Image (cartoon, rainbow, N blue to C red):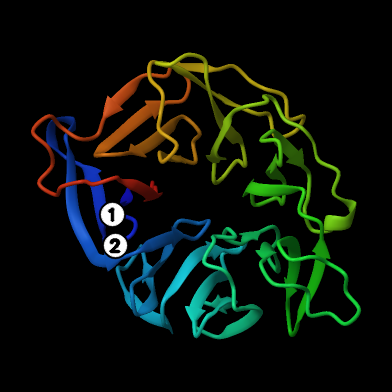
Amino acid sequence: MLILSGDSTTERSLIELSAGPNDSPNYKTVSAGIFEAAANPAQTHLVYATKDEILLRDLRTGEVKSLVKGENFCLAWSLDGKRFSYKQRANGSIKLYVSDVEGHETLVWNDVGAAPADTGCPQWVASDKLIFVRFGPSQKRGSDVKPNTTTLATVGDSVTLVDTEKKWSVEGVCKTGAALLRSEEGEILIAKSLENLKTVSPTSGPCSICRFVGFAPQSCVPFLIEENSRDSSDLFYLNPVNWQRQRSAHIGQTFSPAARMLINSSTRLMVVGDAPASLLLIDTESGDITPLVSKSGPAVQLVSPVPVAWIEN
């Protein structure tokens, strides 16, 4: 497993966790000076941003190559894993780019004079389409779309933009294009596809107040957590065919809003990283918790751990 460890506002380290003797995990620092990282859907490659560039790491061979120079953030992979998107802050503007794994980049949008307030990171909804929130007004002639709206970009030989009113935010999109959304009121919504924003009519999800954990990478099963008391929560999943709620696993604790979670492809285990140095393995069927940090602590110190990739082969 690959984990980011450190203060999110400064540089972090990329840590490799592997099985050790007597059920104790081994920790090894792979690289330092990292601000964020994202694994491709197949969990074979990792893009990560330092203060100077974006690098690509082959998780099978360990080979690393530089792709993009500059201060970059909001890394996200396309659903087919052939391209990734990122934002770049420079000269008072924030630019959104798409790049392939050879470093050939395409400018999608330039928010000139963008405010420092975070407008969120783009989400890929198809192999050639991504959704993002524009801060500035539309550049299309005769457009009356207001700032802070949701835009669908189709990236091919050229870039096509379609604007719509912002009525929800994207929580996550699985490889089939199905998505979980969050309404302005905070309710989880379900959309079968986001490829055409003008025809999207999301339906209500399984709970009014719950947290989307993530999709199981290979099966596209969505997992969610719902707190049922101050000291316990329920983890459940939805049937991706009819989106009905399936049985819950009771977990004997809650998690902070900063907790980051990762489901493995067999959909039976989840790892949770939480501040200040909590890293837990949770059985998604029984709710049993196994700490991945021993009482004596690992040789590598973990700080606010963020699980990034779960490599099973």
Q: Secondary structure at mark 1?
A: loop
Q: Amino acid at mark 1?
A: Asp
**Three-letter code, disc 2:** Thr
Question: For the residue labelled by badge 2, is the local secondary structure a helix, a strand or a loop?
Answer: loop
**Is 200 drawn above or below residue 202 in the view shown?**
below
Q: Residue at x 32, y 48 (%)?
A: 1
Total count of labels: 2
Q: Is residue 78 above or below residue 185?
A: below
Look at mark 1 in the image and give the residue it sits on: 7
Query: Pointer 2: what residue?
Result: 10
Q: Is residue 92 left or right of residue 270?
A: right
What residue is at 88 percent from the left and 56 percent from the top?
198
Q: Which residue is pictured at 79% across the width and 73% down the height?
A: 161
> Left of 51 or right of it: where is 103?
right
Relative to 111, is 249 on the left or the right? left
Q: Distance between the Cα atoms at labels 2 and 1?
A: 5 Å
Q: Nearer the viewer, residue 87 or 267?
A: 87
Q: Residue at x 74, y 60 (%)?
A: 150
- Image location of residue 46, percent across then percent down: 41, 64
Q: Position of residue 18 (x, y in %)?
A: 24, 45
Q: Is residue 199 above or below residue 220?
A: below
Q: Are marks 2 and 1 in contact (CB under 8 Å)?
A: yes
Name the spot of residue 231 as percent of width and height, x first.
Answer: 39, 16
